[in-house]
Amino acid sequence: MSKQKKRSVIKWIVGIVIVAVVVIGGVVSERGSAIPVQTATVTKGRIQSYVEERARTTLPHVYHLTMPEQGRVHPITLEAGAPVKKDQVVVTLDAADLQDALKEANEMVSAMANAVDASQSKITATKAGMEYAKWLWDAKKQLYTAQQTSEMDEKDAQRTYVESQVDFEESQSIFYAMSALNAAVKLMPIYVNRRLNRATLTSPVDGVVLKRYVWNERVMQPGEALLDIGNLNDLEVTADILSEEVVAVKKGQQVEIYGETIGATPIRGTVTRVKPQGFTKISSLGVEQQRVSVIIKFDEKDMAALAADGRTLGLEYRVRVRIFTDEKDHALTVPRTALFRNNKGGWAAYVVRDGKAQLVTVGVGLTNDTQAEILDGLQAGEVVIMAPEASLTSGTRVNADNS
């Protein structure tokens, strides 16, 4: 081969190598400039919107037993957690003075009954005397008319009759007064018995002692607390929901109850009542919030399973609730972190197309903490970027990681 041909071949080979190096270098450079991103695929499936909040176990009725009147309470032996039956005696007061008062009241009733009988007899006697005096005066008048007795005798008989009338009316007045007093005295044993009955406090329901306020014997004033009693079979959950979120909560909606108190497996519940009035509550960050109490009933089967697992809930136990407000099947969904607000205040996402991030505006339907429903702007199977950096712009080449 001539030297000229050899030089041509060498130049041709060198040219090819240079072109290859340039191409490879461009590819490597282009790959090196791609931004690594975490991605997810747009899929179809079920989505549920829910309101999530901390909650506590409550009772619809907690019975507060208090001192009915001033007195000395005997030691209360029932401890918190002790089971009680309806009408079981749980607290007794010292009733010695009341028992003495009842005895005296009964004696007064007997004495007044005798006094009423005596006044009745007095009426009978004075009436008989009045009738006799009337007869005697009539007789004296006839004798005086026949001039068989003096005027003085006739006038004396008249005076005796008038006095007998006064005695009769006076005995009637005494009888009426005694009868009225007797009716009042008869009420005394009733009042004392009523106080005696209050000296023994019984449980209003089958349940347990929730709290004991007094142990030792002591003198207490009316209204002071003694015991709290409730039926833990009526246990429910109360969640204080933000007013802007509670508008989506309705009676009958399903609830998931979970947390360390419940254990690894959540249990179910149902919204039974949304209270009509809100209240102001200060958050842990010191922010004033308007909240509304939502009452949730436990699923009985799940509660039985929880008890069988050795977990028994009590009053004011902390739990978390997830109230499902809406759901859709076959919805187009993306991870919630793929969405963000654009400069117009709408929802947007970055979709990966031809190895580049493309900004798209999307319509959003149901959302929860992990998912969002896409109404328009994306198609099933497309790849979106999760938690995109603020510096990411449309058209930037990305290196997608869909692991």
Image (cartoon, rainbow, N blue to C red):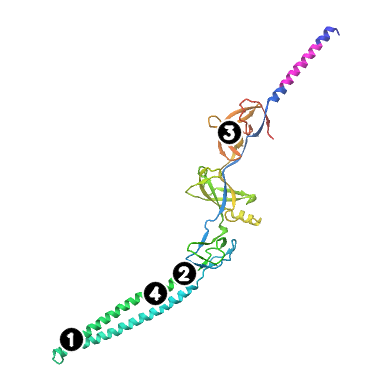
Q: Which residue is mark 4?
A: 185
Q: CA distance from mark 2 to mark 1?
A: 61 Å
Q: Specify the amino acid type for callout 4.
A: Val
**Can you name the residue that lies furthest to the right here?**
1
Dot 1: few (<14), some (14–19), or many (≥20) neighbours within 10 Å? Answer: some
Q: Give whichever of 287, 273 is nearer the camera.
A: 287
In the figure, residue 210 lies in which quadrant? bottom right
Q: Magenta stretch?
A: 9-26
Dot 4 or dot 1: first in sequence order is 1
Label 2 vs 3, first from the N-terminus = 2
Residue 156: quadrant of the picture: bottom left
Question: Where in the figure is residue 33, as x and y percent of width and height?
Answer: 68, 25
CA–CA distance in space, label 1 to label 3: 122 Å
Towards the viewer: 10 or 379: 10
The residue that mark 1 highlights is 155
Front position in the image: 269 or 329: 269
The first of marks 2 and 4 along the sequence is: 4
Helix, strand or loop at mark 2: helix
